[in-house]
Amino acid sequence: MWHDLLVALALLLVIEGIWPFLNPNSMRSILLMIAQHDNRSMRISGLVSMVSGVILLYLVN
């Protein structure tokens, strides 16, 4: 189980690093736009992301 968790974390880091490596200016502007959102919309987007991940895990397994 720990091995699978570490593999998933490593893949997450690789995938998360692709966008800033390829286009750092775009990444910077998107992060500035995200920083201007209020807490409620950030929480909703986080919830949608988590639920989507759980559904994807359920479908894959």
Image: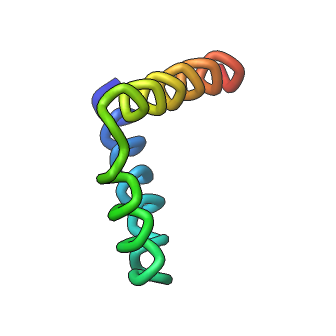
Instruction: Tell me residue 23's x, y (percent).
Output: 48, 82
Q: Is residue 59 left or right of residue 26?
A: right
Q: Nearer the viewer, residue 18 or 32?
A: 32
| Residue at 36 percent of width and 73 percent of height | 28
Q: Decide: is 59 above or below 17.
A: above
Name the quarter where the C terminus is drawn.
top right
| Residue at 31 percent of width and 41 percent of height | 6
Here the colouring is rainbow
Instruction: Tell me residue 24's x, y (percent).
Output: 40, 81
| Residue at 38 percent of width and 45 percent of height | 7
Instruction: Tell me residue 10's x, y (percent).
Output: 35, 52
Residue that protrudes farthest toward the right in the picture: 59
Res 44 quadrant in image = top left
Instruction: Tell me residue 14's x, y (percent).
Output: 41, 62
Q: Nearer the viewer, residue 55 or 30?
A: 30
> How many labels were placed on the picture?
0
Name the quarter where the N terminus is drawn.
top left
Q: Nearer the viewer, residue 32 or 46?
A: 32
| Residue at 53 percent of width and 26 percent of height | 48
Q: Decide: is 33 above or below 20.
A: above
Q: Decide: is 9 above or below 35.
A: above
Q: Nearer the viewer, residue 49 or 17?
A: 49
Q: Is residue 57 left or right of residue 49?
A: right
